[in-house]
Amino acid sequence: MIEPGNPIPVSGGEACGDDDLLTRKEASAFLAQCGVPLKPATLARLWSTGSGGPPCRHIRSRPYYPRGLLREWARAQMTEVRTGAPAAAKGRRRA
């Protein structure tokens, strides 16, 4: 039986890291290591509202997040290094 948070074995008995399924709590800790700190409750809200959170799979109505997809999603949340506010933000500045 596969336990939540443990890697799913592939042929040959080895684990494939990017396919590891993480619980919401484990996904939250992993995202924090990637530089995107989100609480488990925030991940739940992003899923339930369809607000562009990380992709997940459901097994018997429980969400599990593939590690590789979490890593890709975290990278997509980060911008390039900036030296100033983008033009759209400068237009919102109060006088």
Image: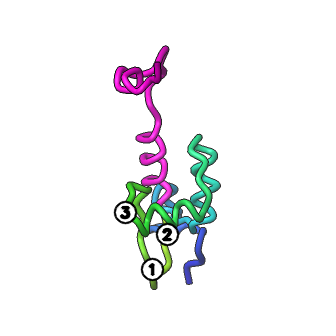
C-alpha span from label 3 to label 2 = 16 Å
In the drawing, what numbered circle is on residue 64?
2
Q: Residues within 10 Å of mark 2 (few under 14, many from 20)?
A: many
Q: Residue furthest top?
A: 83
Secondary structure beneath label 1: strand
Residue type beneath disc 1:
Ile
Report which residue position mark 3 lands on.
50
C-alpha span from label 1 to label 2 = 7 Å
**Direction from residue 28 to residue 77 in the image, left or right:** left
Q: Residue at x 39, y 57 (%)?
A: 51
Q: Residue 58: x, y in percent?
A: 43, 75
Q: Residue 71: x, y in percent?
A: 48, 48
Secondary structure beneath label 2: strand
Frontmost of labels 1 and 3 is 3
The mark nearer the N terminus, 3 or 2, is 3
Q: Residue 28: x, y in percent?
A: 60, 57
Q: Residues within 10 Å of mark 1 (few under 14, many from 20)?
A: few
Q: Residues within 10 Å of mark 3 (few under 14, many from 20)?
A: few
Residue type beneath disc 3:
Gly
C-alpha span from label 1 to label 3 = 19 Å
Number of marks drawn? 3
The mark nearer the N terminus, 1 or 3, is 3
Of the 4 image quadrants, the one containing the N terminus is bottom right
Relative to 5, say whether 85 is above or below.
Answer: above
Q: Which residues are magenta?
A: 66-95
On whether residue 85 falls in the magenta region, the answer is: yes
Q: Residue 94: x, y in percent?
A: 46, 23
Quarter of the figure with residue 69: bottom left
Q: Tell me, yes or no, whether the two marked residues, 1 and 2, touch with CB atoms within 8 Å.
A: yes
Report which residue position mark 1 lands on.
59
Secondary structure beneath label 3: loop
